[in-house]
Image (cartoon, rainbow, N blue to C red):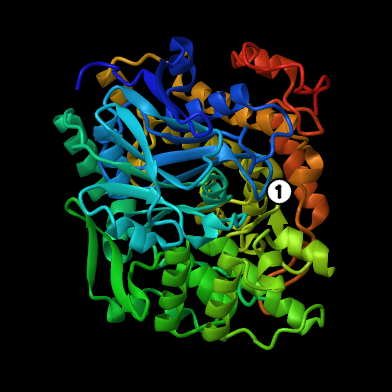
């Protein structure tokens, strides 16, 4: 691979049916690197405040990093757009065969930027640093069937949920084994009538010694050994043990059936292990809907979250989500909301916690908007809660449903969820993995830990590093950027802070303020069983400390001096209101 070759981007206008290769501004490459960073810069530049996420003016990007396809672990790509669920910034990531094939198809490009909307369903075929539009013959098919239609290529596609613009529809790759899941990028794709991106190309080669060095670090490290032992499924056992497992629609923090859907159940049911190179990853199991690889979130959101203690049933519900193209975290919360609303008499639906058949039936109704309840739930828990007067049953942040790590068991996670740039997300900062062993943190320590992890993740997502392999990138990828000759504007910690602040500026321009970072009311309530609710005053102290750590004002808007220090004054526009006072 030649030095620093990914300096262009393919712009696809679906309305005009045009494809153009254009240079990425050189300064942007040094300031924002690739992946999340470049996506945030393009999104801020391209969109006006108030742009309809499902309108033709929204932008959808499929982005790589400067060393995509060469890194150890599972190759990934970033889907970046304005979220139809939250109305704010969205970056979502998926792995598998598609991103490495896309990296081979685009040797000179950092990705594809899609605007407009097609007059009829299309697919985008990417090969040899170019792209062509073709009619989408698989419109109406699920994610698995769409992938099967292109056995000689790798696909990123939507299922029925994306076609029907469900606010948490995913973009599925590898036939539904991998998903750019949270926030509804699949709905944006559906609104543009873009069924699939089909990539053809041989994965890039090079930097073999560096790759092997980092691969060895990963294999010898704690994360690599943990994944080889249990994949991510053991997270349900961990969360249950520390009292941080959301159960039965956020009413409890432990689940008596955790062992029946956790790692032991998966091991006994699995056909084989899934691999990334020589590294063991998830467990492949058979369901009546087809083979699937359940992740930790499957057992947590669709098992404990719905009170279902039969592993086979949980795996089948997960595969239903995979094929329909539904984010299983939001989907699990949507079903949990419906069960609780039924218990409260807000709706009339005859099913309960522990009912897998009822859950699968409702998920199909959501994905295809087949019933009034399914249609309402398709717009997210916040929307359905307002419609049926049940907006305090399931917690959300910026309209995104929380993952099943219950922050009442590790309160720094409440701050991580509240301040996440894309809405409630455990991948921006996973402080639960440390706080539970330290006996609780002061507000200042929680704020610093959350901000540091958010910045570090932002850098790694510019390179689009495998989340788990990223744990051994102590230099945040500096050696890799040196290897391809890409110099950054400032050290990598500053790059991460710059990108996190830019996504905040985007959200501020869309109207986000401190009110959107507040503690969800449901989390102030004590759960049944062990644990207590989160004290709102203590949470406010954490949030104040976080804003101070970030150099933002007391209303959550970045200070002008922070913007200037990070070199973002060249980006910020007059529509974005900055803070003028210190917190």
Image coordinates for residue 206, horizontal then vertical, percent: 16, 28
**Is 43 left or right of 465, judged from the image as shown?**
right
Q: Can residue 241 be spotted in the picture?
A: no
Q: Going by the picture, which residue comes out furthest to the bottom?
A: 350
**Is 57 left or right of 175, judged from the image as shown?**
right
Q: Is residue 448 above or below residue 120?
A: above
Q: Is residue 366 above or below residue 401?
A: below
- Residue 112 location, quadrant: top left
- For this rendering, which residue is in front, 245 or 103? 103
Image coordinates for residue 389, horizontal then vertical, percent: 85, 68
Image coordinates for residue 198, horizontal then vertical, percent: 32, 44
Location of the C terminus (image quadrant): top right
**Is 567 left or right of 278, judged from the image as shown?**
right
> What residue is pinned by disc 1?
398
- For this rendering, which residue is in front, 504 or 188? 188
Image coordinates for residue 405, horizontal then vertical, percent: 57, 62
Q: Is residue 553 above or below residue 414?
A: above
- For this rendering, which residue is in front, 132 or 279? 132
Task: Say what secondary structure mark 1 lies in.
Answer: loop
User: How many numbered marks appear?
Assistant: 1
At 48% from the left and 79% from the top, the residue drawn is 258
Location of the N terminus (image quadrant): top left
- For this rendering, which residue is in front, 186 or 294? 186
How crowded is the residue under tag 1: few (<14 C-alpha within 10 Å), some, or many (20+)? many
At 24% from the left and 34% from the top, the residue drawn is 104
At 16% from the left and 32% from the top, the residue drawn is 205
At 67% from the left and 63% from the top, the residue drawn is 408
Q: Can residue 178 be spotted in the picture?
A: yes
């Amino acid at each position: 691979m030649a030095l620093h070759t990914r300096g262009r981007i393919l712009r696809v206008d679906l309305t005009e049916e045009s494809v153009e290769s254009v240079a990425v501004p050189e300064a942007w490459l040094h300031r924002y690197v690739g992946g999340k960073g470049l996506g945030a810069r393009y999104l801020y530049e391209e969109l006006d405040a108030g742009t309809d996420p499902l309108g033709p003016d929204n932008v959808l990007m499929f982005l790589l990093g400067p060393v995509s396809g060469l890194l150890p672990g599972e190759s990934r790509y970033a889907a970046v757009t304005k979220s139809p669920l939250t109305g704010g910034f969205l970056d979502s990531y998926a792995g598998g065969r598609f991103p490495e094939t896309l990296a081979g198809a685009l040797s000179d490009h950092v990705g594809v930027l899609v605007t407009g909307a097609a007059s009829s369903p299309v697919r985008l075929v990417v090969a040899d640093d170019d792209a062509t539009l073709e009619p989408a013959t698989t419109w109406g098919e699920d994610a698995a069937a769409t992938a099967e239609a292109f056995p000689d290529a790798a696909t990123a596609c939507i299922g029925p949920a994306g076609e029907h613009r469900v606010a948490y529809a995913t973009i599925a790759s590898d036939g539904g084994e991998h998903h750019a899941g949270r926030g509804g990028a699949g709905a944006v794709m559906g609104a543009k009538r873009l069924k699939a991106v089909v990539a053809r190309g041989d994965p890039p080669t090079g930097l073999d010694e560096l790759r092997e060095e980092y691969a060895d670090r990963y294999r010898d490290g704690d994360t690599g050994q943990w994944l080889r032992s249990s994949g991510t499924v053991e997270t349900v056992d961990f969360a249950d043990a520390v009292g941080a497992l959301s159960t039965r629609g956020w009413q409890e923090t432990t689940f008596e059936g955790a062992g029946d859907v956790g790692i032991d159940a998966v091991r006994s049911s699995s056909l084989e292990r899934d691999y990334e190179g020589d590294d063991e990853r998830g467990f492949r199991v058979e369901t009546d809907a087809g083979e699937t690889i359940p992740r930790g979130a499957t057992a947590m959101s669709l098992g404990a979250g719905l009170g279902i203690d039969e592993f086979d049933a949980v795996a089948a519900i997960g595969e239903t989500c995979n094929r329909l193209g539904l984010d299983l975290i939001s989907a699990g919360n949507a079903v949990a909301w419906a069960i609780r609303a039924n218990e409260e008499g807000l709706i009339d639906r005859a099913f309960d916690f522990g009912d897998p058949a009822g859950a699968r039936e409702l998920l199909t109704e959501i994905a295809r908007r087949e019933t009034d309840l399914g249609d309402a739930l398709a717009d997210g828990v916040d929307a359905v809660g307002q419609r049926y007067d049940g907006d305090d049953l399931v917690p959300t942040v910026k309209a995104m449903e929380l993952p099943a790590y219950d922050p009442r068991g590790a309160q720094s996670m409440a701050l991580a969820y509240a301040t996440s740039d894309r809405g409630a997300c455990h991948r921006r900062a996973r402080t639960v993995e440390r706080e539970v062993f330290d006996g609780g943190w002061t507000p200042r320590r929680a704020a610093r830990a959350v901000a540091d992890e958010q910045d570090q993740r932002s850098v790694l997502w510019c390179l689009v590093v495998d989340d788990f392999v990223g744990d051994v990138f102590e230099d945040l990828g500096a050696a890799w950027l040196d290897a391809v000759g890409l110099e950054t504007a400032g050290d990598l910690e500053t790059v991460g802070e710059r990108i996190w602040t830019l996504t905040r500026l985007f959200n501020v321009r869309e109207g986000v303020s401190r009110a959107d970072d507040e503690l969800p009311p449901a989390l102030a309530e004590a759960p049944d069983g062990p644990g207590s609710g989160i004290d709102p005053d203590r949470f406010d102290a954490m949030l104040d400390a976080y804003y101070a750590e970030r150099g933002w004002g007391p209303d959550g808007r970045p200070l002008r001096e922070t913007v200037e220090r990070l070199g973002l004054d060249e980006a910020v526009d007059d529509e974005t209101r900055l803070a003028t006072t210190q917190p």
